[in-house]
Amino acid sequence: MPGERLPLGFVFRSRAKDEKASVADKAPLTDSKQTRDPQAPKGRPTPKRSEAQSQRRSVANTSSSRKDAAKRQREERRAQLERQRQALAGGDERFLPVRDKGPVRKFARDTIDSRFNVAEFFLPMAVVILVLSMVRVGSLQTIALLLWLVVIVLIVLDSLFTGLRLKKRLAERFPDQNRRGAVAYALMRSLQMRRLRLPKPQVKRGERP
């Protein structure tokens, strides 16, 4: 009514309360009985038991397959090393390491194994010279020093002769194949005693390869 007075509390009521009430009225009602799993991530539904079990089985199968693959690789590696060991002892070209494979490397090995090399006697001669040098006799120590010089000169000269001769024969025998590193490979083999060489020698002394 125009002449009716309104209560003071109604006139001075805060607008903020009215706005909060309107927002609360517009908010959607939620079912208070529906509870959220405290273990579930926020905003994501809890997975079903069957899905969780399938995920666990998938992870277990993946880890098991990785272990099986690693085990197979170790077994294959062990078998490969065993084949290489037998090939080094028997000379089977199929399973030799890459460093020893090929007809060029085989020819270089056979050339070294078919002759006497001064360098292969270096170790026993070094032991003799070392014993002589330890004796407290001036003449024996002088002889030991001279033997050192003689042995070194003989090894250098013999290695030069062997390297040049082998390089020429490789060029004649394998003109179209890669011969890089074959001479150095043969000279390194000549430094080893015959019984300690790997792959084992396949030719006798004096036998032409």
Image (cartoon, rainbow, N blue to C red):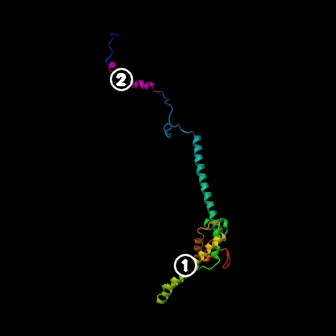
Q: Is residue 25 magenta?
A: yes
| Above or below, 189 relative to 148 | above
| Above or below, 48 relative to 87 | above
Q: Position of residue 133 (x, y in %)?
A: 49, 85
Name the residue at the left extreme. Answer: 8
Q: Position of residue 163 (x, y in %)?
A: 59, 75
Instruction: Give, as a three-letter code, the residue at label 2.
Output: Arg
Q: Which residues are magenta?
A: 9-28
Which residue shows up at 58% across the image and 46% down it? 56
Say which of 50 and 177 sits in front.
Answer: 177
Give me the disc on residue 15. Answer: 2
Query: Is there CB contact under 8 Å for labels 1 and 2?
Result: no
Instruction: Give, as a three-letter code, the residue at label 1.
Output: Val
Say which of 163 and 195 sits in front.
Answer: 163
70 left or right of 149 in image:
right
Which residue shows up at 57% across the image and 42% down it? 52
Quadrant of the image occupied by residue 186: bottom right
Residue under circle 1? 156
Quadrant of the image occupied by residue 121: bottom right
Give me the disc on residue 40. Answer: none
